[in-house]
């Protein structure tokens, strides 16, 4: 499929375009947006946390997915690729799709200079329209700093943050905790 001369695409046109594209793109209510390549530290952070989560949650009713797993946010008409998603129980897929999840419990994003404002603002607002979504973790790739939001039974979101290698990040919606030094293992702040 060729890109159109105008900027509006249906979700179906986006999916056809995306499946045939060598690069990944997000879809935001009619607009197709190319995703930039990630730096090594970004990938280290995703790999470190996703590996630890996957190992800790093995043999339990959770699935851990990383960057290439597409998410559909129907109320906002958005297709996106979170850095890490955890799904509890059975996968729910977008109608007619086998490659697009709709029911994450937990989402993790690694912040970059180009995505930080979006990830902390509108993207979080969009994620909150997903009924199953209960916890959001934001990892800074330029310093040892993690922000955490989790949803309470009264539909409020609680915020906390952790700094420093010895700090422990305790998840609220999955049985998991990790020392920040393990998340930041091999991250070279001087390299980027």
Image (cartoon, rainbow, N blue to C red):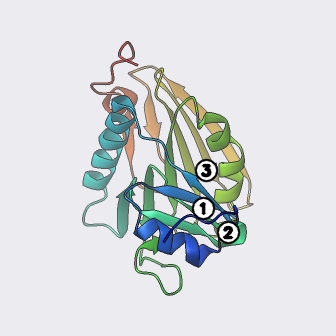
Q: In the figure, 189 relative to 139: above or below?
A: above
Q: Which of the labelled discs sits on residue 92, or is there none?
A: none
Q: Which residue is mark 3?
A: 150
Q: Nearer the viewer, residue 76 or 124?
A: 76
Could you give the CA–CA distance between mark 1 and mark 2, rounded to whole angstroms?
Answer: 8 Å
The reply to whether discs 1 and 2 touch (Cβ–Cβ < 8 Å) is yes
Kindly indicate the quadrant of the structure image that contains residue 119. top right
In terms of sequence position, does the residue under pointer 1 or pointer 2 come before the other? 1
Q: Nearer the viewer, residue 14 or 4?
A: 4
Do we see residue 3 in this rendering? Answer: yes
Q: Which residue is mark 2?
A: 77
The reply to whether discs 1 and 3 touch (Cβ–Cβ < 8 Å) is no
How many residues crowd mark 3 within 10 Å: few (<14), some (14–19), many (20+)? some
Q: In the structure shown, which secondary structural element does the residue marked by tag 3 occupy?
A: strand
Looking at the image, residue 124 sits to the left or right of residue 83; the answer is right
In terms of sequence position, does the residue under pointer 2 or pointer 3 come before the other? 2
Q: In the structure shown, which secondary structural element does the residue marked by tag 2 occupy?
A: loop
How many residues crowd mark 1 within 10 Å: few (<14), some (14–19), many (20+)? many
Of marks 1 and 3, the one in the foreground:
1
Residue 133, image x, y percentages: 59, 62
Of marks 1 and 2, the one in the foreground:
1
Q: Quadrant of the C terminus?
A: top left
Residue 178, image x, y percentages: 37, 38
Do we see residue 101 in this rendering? Answer: no
Q: In the structure shown, which secondary structural element does the residue marked by tag 1 occupy?
A: strand
Of marks 2 and 3, the one in the foreground:
2
Q: Which of the labelled discs sits on residue 27, or is there none?
A: 1
- Residue at 35 percent across and 70 percent down: it is 61
How many residues crowd mark 2 within 10 Å: few (<14), some (14–19), many (20+)? some
Could you give the CA–CA distance between mark 1 and mark 3, rounded to whole angstroms?
Answer: 26 Å
């Amino acid at each position: 499929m060729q890109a159109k001369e105008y900027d509006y695409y249906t979700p179906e046109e986006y999916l056809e375009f995306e499946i045939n594209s060598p690069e990944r793109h997000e879809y935001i209510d009619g607009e197709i947006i190319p995703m930039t390549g990630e730096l090594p530290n970004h990938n280290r952070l995703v790999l470190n946390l996703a590996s630890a989560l996957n190992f800790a949650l093995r043999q339990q009713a959770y699935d851990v997915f990383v960057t290439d797993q597409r998410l559909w946010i129907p109320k906002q008409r958005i297709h996106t690729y979170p850095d890490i998603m955890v799904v509890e129980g059975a996968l729910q897929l977008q109608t007619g799709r086998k490659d697009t999840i709709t029911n994450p419990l937990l989402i993790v994003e690694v912040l970059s200079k180009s995505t930080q404002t979006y990830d902390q603002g509108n993207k979080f607002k969009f994620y909150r329209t997903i009924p199953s979504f209960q916890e959001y973790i934001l990892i800074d790739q330029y310093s040892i700093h993690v922000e955490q939001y989790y949803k309470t039974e009264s539909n409020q979101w609680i915020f906390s943050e952790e700094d420093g290698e010895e700090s422990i990040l305790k998840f609220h919606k999955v049985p998991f905790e990790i020392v920040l030094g393990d998340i930041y293992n091999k991250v070279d702040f001087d390299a980027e």
